[in-house]
Amino acid sequence: MPRLYHTKSKTGCARCRARRVKCDEAKPKCNSCARHQVSCLYDRTDCWKTSKPDDNSATDPALHRESVPLMSAESRDRRYLELRLLHMWTTEVCQTLPGSYDAQNLRIWAHDVPKIALDYEPLLTAIFSITLFYMVCNNSQVDIGKDELFAHRARYFQAALRDHRQALGSMDHRTANGASFTSVILIFDAFASLRERWIQPIDPNIPYKSPTEWLRMCRGARNVAAVGLRMIGKDSDTTFGIMARGAAAFIDPEVIYTEANRARFAHLLSVIAGKPENDIDNKAYVTAVAYIGSVAAAMEAGEIPLKVARRVTIFPFILHDRFITLIEMLSPRALVILGHYFALLSHLDGIWWMSNYPEKEIEAINDSLSSEWQGMMAWPLQVLRERGQRSAVRGSEK
């Protein structure tokens, strides 16, 4: 079974579960919420701790759902909430997804995917989860408090992951379409969740923690979608097959890995005196640099933001495993390359699942580097300055 990314908190507060971080469960407010100066909501009982299913019940999905009740009982309020979420998905959220600039893709997301979700419950739950995240991030004017939205978001997200994992164990050509779309939504969720890393201000005294979990989340979901596509057949007329064919041009090696794209950020590959790179590491760096060069070229050519967004979401998929390891090791060159990637993302701050986290990542990466490597961060820092100046001008015009 393809590996899907994991979650870190099951019994903690709603906010920690939504952020997928460990909660110390201090009462009345956990240390994480206290540190971030936000409200803390415990919306789950201790059934996770007191209910330990035996070996037989652990393999029975029905029993598992009973022993670990993530979702609220069927009720008028729940039906009303889910109807509202599905309506918001079709009328608002779909228009913000990468690829929705294409009329066929938009129709697939808004019309076909909800129909598929009726036969693949993890997809329906994932739709509810990311729509709740959209409502939180956009301060949607609804008669539900932000804390309650966070609590709903955490429950639906956990349920989507759990049920999706269970369903993957028996995935076949009948469920591959639904499983693949679920995985793609989880990729968007992973990007949106990056903003949760920066709830509090940057503390220069705390070492930079690279976002490797985000990269692994994306790759885990990508692997599921790839298996699903093989089951469906890439030339099939299924909705996921149609959408996948439309994305093929964004990963065409003959288009992406050209000398022109590598040359755009050639300085990122220059040898630092006394610090030569081995062939494996160098190949990982070249692949990443060429891809961000292709994204920069598309931006300079005037490509629309949602089309660029489709390119940047593919970035985690094309990386060598070694590059992710280098990021985890806080390799200066890998971090500088990642800083350039985030500089490209910063141009997409009008898209809700991007927000301003790229700027935070760039600043934190730069602060973590020694002086000999900080010189390579000149372009990302210049992008931040220019965007800051434009924001100031827009603010003065209001």
Image (cartoon, rainbow, N blue to C red):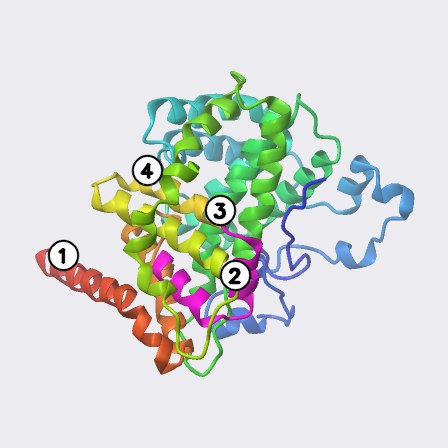
- Residue type, label 3: Ile
Horizontal relation, residue 210 to residue 168: left or right: left
The residue at which mark 2 appears reads as 279
The residue at which mark 1 appears reads as 394
- Residue type, label 1: Arg
The residue at which mark 3 appears reads as 318
Give the CA separation, mark 1 to mark 2: 47 Å
The residue at which mark 4 appears reads as 307
Q: Secondary structure at mark 2?
A: helix
Mark 3 surroundings: few (<14), some (14-19) or many (≥20) residues within 10 A: few
- Residue type, label 2: Asp
Give the CA separation, mark 2 to mark 3: 18 Å
Task: Residue 88: say if magenta.
Answer: no
Give the CA separation, mark 3 to mark 1: 36 Å
Q: Secondary structure at mark 3?
A: helix
Task: Residue 334: say if magenta.
Answer: yes
Give the CA separation, mark 4 to mark 2: 33 Å
The quadrant holding residue 12 is bottom right
Which segment did they paint magenta? 317-341
